[in-house]
Structures are given as C-alpha cells and as structure tokens.
Image (cartoon, helix red, strand yellow):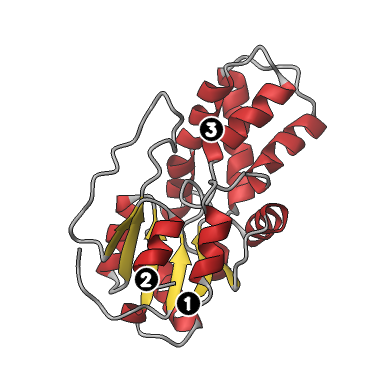
Amino acid sequence: MIASAAPQLLVFDVFGTVVDWHGSIAREVRALRAEVDAEAFALAWRAGYQPAMQRVRSGELGWTLIDDLHRLILDQVLQQFRVTDFGEAEKRHLNKAWHRLDPWPDVVAGLTRLKTRHTICTLSNGNIALLTNMAKRAGLPWDCILSAEVFRAYKPDPAVYLGAAKVFDLPPEAVMMVAAHQNDLAAARSCGLQTAYIERPAEFGIKQRKDVSPDPANTRHARDFVDLAAQLGC
C-alpha cells in the first residue's frame, strides 16, 4: 500500500461497497414471485447497469437518472425471465427495491467511527432520492450525499471525482475514494485521489465469490469499514 497524508474527506461507492445489492434484490424478487430464480434475476438486472449508463455516456440517451435506467433494464429482465403478469404498480414497487438495499453488517458501525475524524460522503451513480431513501431506511450516518446526478456525469468520468473535491474546496489528494471495485478506484487515482479497497467477496452472492486480492496501487486495503476505521486511527 502507498503511504499518504491522512485524507480529510472520504467518499464512498455505494452499490456493493456499502450495501448488499444482490442479497437485497433477490429477497425482494423472491417475495413477489417465489417461482422465479431470484438470485439469477438480481444478477441479470445488475448486468444491465453498465451498458445502460454507457448509453448515457455515449450520448445515445440524454441525462437519465439511475432510477429510470433501472426501470428500463427491469422491463427487459422481466421479459427474459418470462414474468408477464406484473402490473405497473408491481413494477414500480420492485424498481424502488434499489432504495431499500440492506447495508453490510459492518457498515453502520464502521461509518460511525470513520466520521469521528473524517467527513464521510457518498459518491455514487445512484440518484439523490435513491441514496437518501436508502440512508434513511438503513441508518447510514452520512455527512453529505453526493451523486452523479449533481455532476450530470457517471463514474468513471473525472468530473465526478474532481467534482467531489471541488464541492468541499479540497485538493484531490485530500480525498479518499472508498470502494469494492478496482476499476472505480483506478479512475479515482487517475484524478489524484487516494484510494481504499474494501473486500466484499459475496457481492455477487455466495455462489460467485469475488477475487478480493490487494492492488498495491491503492492507499489502503481493508476487510471492511471497521478495519478501515482502525487503519485510519478512528
């Protein structure tokens, strides 16, 4: 890991890093249709995430909130899984499942410790309403909620990482990006941010364990948020 001055601002990826999207979405699907393979449905829905954002990045779609992209993907996944009896109310309810994702067990305790010495803030592609509703439900103690919506650009666009530093009037090197995704961290590093990798081996479910090997380019590598708090002296 790379030695650096202590960051003033910690910005967090959310889906997969803070919350268990796979387990939470599978739970919601299972509750609505027990006969559907809920784990496969969750994976398929998430698999549409990057391609949908790429349509925005490329200009094929104008600026579109993640809530609306999730709905576009959901309509496709329902067809894929031959679920043809969902009414509009059920579709809207299921689409809002992304507002109801459960945090990993270490998250609230870890964030509470981290905010004793640092400003903690989301830096997610999720829209503001989604992130706010999620935080309210799960008791996530953010100091601030920042979203790609603020910058009208999706990660890994540099405007998002540099925009977070600008909001707080900080140089990029005073900001640490915290994520469970090496590509997110690599993009943040290219903008001058410090980076902390968080191990989430079950992000895609227990049947698809994720490689969580350290990357020496990161400033920190932690098992979870409690471990990161300990490393940062919180």
Q: Residues within 10 Å of mark 2 (few under 14, many from 20)?
A: some
Q: Secondary structure at mark 1?
A: loop
**Amino acid carrying mark 2 in the image:** Leu
Judged from the image, the secondary structure of the residue bearing numbered disc 3 is helix
Q: Position of residue 160 (x, y in %)?
A: 44, 68
Q: Residue at x 31, y 52 (%)?
A: 183
- Seen from the viewer's position, the closer of residues 90 and 142 is 142
Q: Is residue 84 visible?
A: yes
Q: Earlier in the sequence, mark 3 or mark 2?
A: 3
Quadrant of the image occupied by residue 77: top right
Any part of residue 63 in sight: no
**Do tag 1 and tag 3 residues touch (Cβ < 8 Å)?**
no
Q: Which residue is mark 1?
A: 118
Question: Do callouts 2 and 1 mark residues in contact (Cβ within 8 Å)?
Answer: yes
Q: Residues within 10 Å of mark 1 (few under 14, many from 20)?
A: some
Q: CA distance from mark 3 to mark 2?
A: 35 Å
> Mark 3 — residue?
45
Observer-side mark, 3 or 2, equals: 2
- Residue 94 x/y as whole percent: 70, 34
